[in-house]
Image: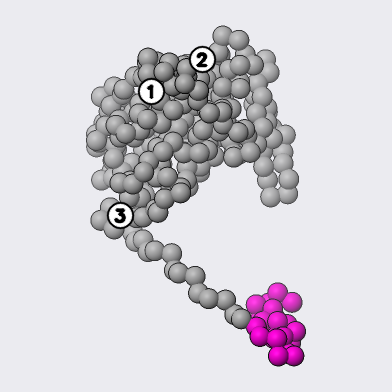
Amino acid sequence: MKIAVLVKEVPDTWGDRRIDPSTKRVDRKGDLVIDEINEKSVEAALLVKEANAGSEVTVVTMGPSSALAAIRKALAMGADNGIHIVDDGLVGSDAMQTSAALAAALRPGGFELIITGNESTDGRTAAVPAMLAERLGLAQLTFLRTLSVTGDGVTGERMTDEGHLDVRASLPALVSVTEQIAEARFPNFRGIMAAKKKKVESLGLAGLGLPADETGAENSWSVVEDVAPRPARSGGTIVKDDGTAGTQLADFLAAAKLI
């Protein structure tokens, strides 16, 4: 089985995240790491590979030259090869353009299963998986907390506000997974050394067959009009118990329409 798993390089969630006021996009000058949800996506792909003899996992990312580190991390975990979509003409691409580039890279591979995270921690659109499935004409199962492949189908549990749904699709298919899917393994020394020798194909706009006038920030389908920092938290209300604390609390809850 040919499996593709998408990963993304994002600003470290443990660091301070800022918006570049000139571009109105996430400032990527700080520490960059593979998105945590993508580590779990890779783990899900490796578990499917281990359960289906002869399977191969290809890691795919779109990003600058530094994003190669995200691919190498996934290769060290056990993936077999990678595809790096990198081109200055793609800088600032929105979800629509990103899905077009990913589809162009994945289409020739004949992948039977594509695994993604449900959303990245920088953009948080949660739209790329569905857009990509539509472009590739694949069945899609999104927001899965479990995943298994049996025969010619894929099954899983999809999270809902009321609980979960048991869902199934025939292969080939695309699935997006949540943080509950699996705990990612740590690469061992042998895996890290082996990752350095694994093949990573680099693709630009020419290799993807995409015209430059349809990609990048200048040709984006969506435009950020304005950004503003999150307001600082204000101090809470302190109730001093002078014999009327109960009444004060009741008044506070009533004002907030909680009682």
Query: If you read the primary sequence from the N terminus, does the residue marked by circle 2 or circle 1 appear first?
Result: 2
Q: CA distance from mark 3 to mark 2?
A: 39 Å
Q: Is residue 12 left or right of residue 52?
A: left
Instruction: Report the residue at 39% width, 53% height from top.
Output: 17
Helix, strand, or loop for circle 2?
A: strand
Helix, strand, or loop for circle 3?
A: strand
Q: Is residue 253 above or below residue 228?
A: below
Q: Residues within 10 Å of mark 2 (few under 14, many from 20)?
A: many
Quarter in which the N terminus is drawn: top right
Q: Position of residue 154 (x, y in %)?
A: 65, 24
Identify the residue position indicated by label 1 in the image: 83
Q: Position of residue 257 (x, y in %)?
A: 68, 77
Between 118 and 168, the residue placed more toward the observer is 118
Mark drawn on residue 216:
none
Considering every residue shown, the one lying at the far top of the view is 54
Q: Is residue 243 magenta?
A: yes
- The residue under label 2 is which amino acid type? Glu
Q: Position of residue 177 (x, y in %)?
A: 58, 35
Q: Position of residue 138 (x, y in %)?
A: 53, 26
Instruction: Report the residue at 56% width, 31% height from top.
Output: 184
- The residue under label 1 is which amino acid type? Ile
Query: If you read the primary sequence from the N terminus, does the residue marked by circle 3 or circle 2 appear first?
Result: 3
Q: Is residue 94 visible?
A: no
Q: Is residue 92 visible?
A: yes
Query: If you read the primary sequence from the N terminus, does the residue marked by circle 1 or circle 3 appear first?
Result: 3
Q: Residues within 10 Å of mark 1 (few under 14, many from 20)?
A: many
Q: Which residues are magenta?
A: 239-259
Badge 2 vs badge 1, beta-carbon distance below 8 Å? no
Instruction: Report the residue at 28% width, 26% height from top.
Output: 204
Identify the residue position indicated by label 2 in the image: 56
Identify the residue position indicated by label 3 in the image: 20
